[in-house]
Amino acid sequence: MDQTGKAQYITWIRGLPLQLRALVEGLDEEQLTTHFVEGEWNVAQNVHHLADTNMNVFMRIKMALTEDRPTVASFDQDKWADTAEAHGMPIEPSLVLLDGLQERWASLAETLSDEQLARSIVSPLYGESTIGDMVQGYSRHGLNHLDQIRETLAAQG
């Protein structure tokens, strides 16, 4: 990962909470919890999912920085999106979590050397991933879910 790419990914990481808040601001309960696109998560599930996955990737990056090729637990994102709090609680706690989490992650990423970006974790499902892979992949992951939320809101009619 070159420094220009790294800077772009950090911008996306840091900008996710504001973009997400702009998309969900003023939505009512029906808009947040209705499945307007069959087979896709509703808006609230997307918000909670972003908090879940970004907590996980931040922890994985910290593990990769402090341990030698740690093996990390995998999780079923669809089952996580189906837990009670992903359906029943307001999105604000997940938005607040993302506010702080994304800032910490972006601040950490800014300090990473090329050697640190090359450190890795091992996932039983996905194999080996470097910190650079995670920074790149999960910065784009946030953008993809913003698009999914836009598509869901557009489908409401």
Image (tube, helix red, strand yellow):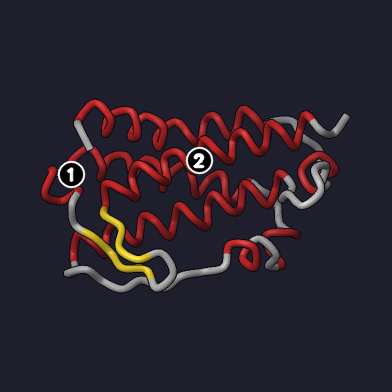
Quadrant in the picture for the C terminus? top right
Residue at image x 83%, y 42%? 36
Q: Percent x, y for residue 119?
A: 19, 57
Upstream in sequence: badge 2 or badge 1? 1
Residue at image x 53%, y 45%? 96
Considering the numbered disc 2 on the image, is that residue within a helix, a strand or a loop?
helix
Considering the numbered disc 1 on the image, is that residue within a helix, a strand or a loop?
loop
Residue at image x 66%, y 48%? 91
37 left or right of 90? right
> Which three-letter amino acid code belongs to the residue tagged 2?
Gly
Residue at image x 45%, y 38%? 140
Residue for badge 1: 112
Residue for badge 2: 142
Q: Give 78 or 21, whichever is nearer the viewer.
A: 78
Q: Give 17 or 69, whichever is nearer the viewer.
A: 69
140 left or right of 94? left
Q: Percent x, y for residue 100?
A: 42, 45
Q: From mark 2 to mark 1, how far is it between C-alphas?
A: 20 Å
Instruction: Decide: is 92 above or below 60.
Output: above
Q: Percent x, y for residue 108?
A: 25, 45
Badge number at residue 4:
none
122 left or right of 149? left
